[in-house]
Structure formats: structure tokens, C-alpha cells
Image (cartoon, rainbow, N blue to C red):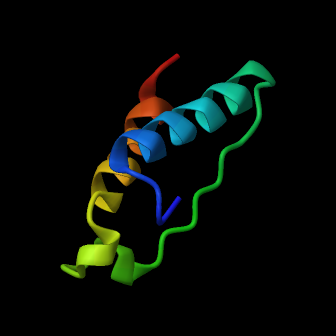
Amino acid sequence: LKKQSLLDKKQELQRLIDEVKQVNGTFTAVFHNYTFGPDERWKGFKELFSLILESADET
């Protein structure tokens, strides 16, 4: 996901989350601490992490 646009990243992540929910599975995300830092190459990953957290609250 690192090299895709933010919109593409969000769409792909949502697709994966939806697939996991369809089979009542468990989604496990691994984010390293540096992906939340100021480095430009990780821009938008905080937003993706928030999307994961928000999807966990949905029923």
C-alpha cells in the first residue's frame, strides 16, 4: 500500500476489511511506530489506521 495514492489505499483497505467481516474473521494490522512519524513517505497512514479503528466499532 505504501506507493499507492491515499484514495487507492483507503479503497483497498476497506475492501480487505469488508472481506474479513463477511467471513466473521479477525483483521490484524501491523503498523510500526515510524509510520506515524513526520516522514513524508508515510503521509496518510494515520488516517488509514483510524479507518481500521473505526471499522472495528461498526457492526
Residue 9 in the figure: left or right of residue 29: left
Instruction: Please indicate, yes or no, whether residue 52 appears anywhere in the rendered image.
Output: no
Residue 30 in the figure: left or right of residue 10: right
- Farthest residue, direction right: 23
Horizontal and vertical percent for residue 15? Answer: 60, 31
Which quarter of the picture shows residue 42? Answer: bottom left
Please report the residue visible at 36 percent of the width from the left and 83 percent of the height from the top: 34
Task: Give the camera-side residue of 48 and 24.
Answer: 48
Which quarter of the picture shows residue 51? Answer: top left
Horizontal and vertical percent for residue 26? Answer: 72, 42
State how many labels appear: 0
Residue 55 in the figure: left or right of residue 25: left
- Farthest residue, direction left: 38
Horizontal and vertical percent for residue 2? Answer: 48, 65
Horizontal and vertical percent for residue 19? Answer: 71, 28
Instruction: Please indicate, yes or no, whether residue 44 appears anywhere in the rendered image.
Output: yes
- Farthest residue, direction top: 59
Position of 18 relative to 59 (above/below): below
Position of 43 relative to 14 (above/below): below
Please report the residue visible at 76 percent of the width from the left and 26 percent of the height from the top: 24
Please report the residue visible at 58 percent of the width from the left and 58 percent of the height from the top: 29
Please report the residue visible at 63 percent of the width from the left and 26 percent of the height from the top: 18
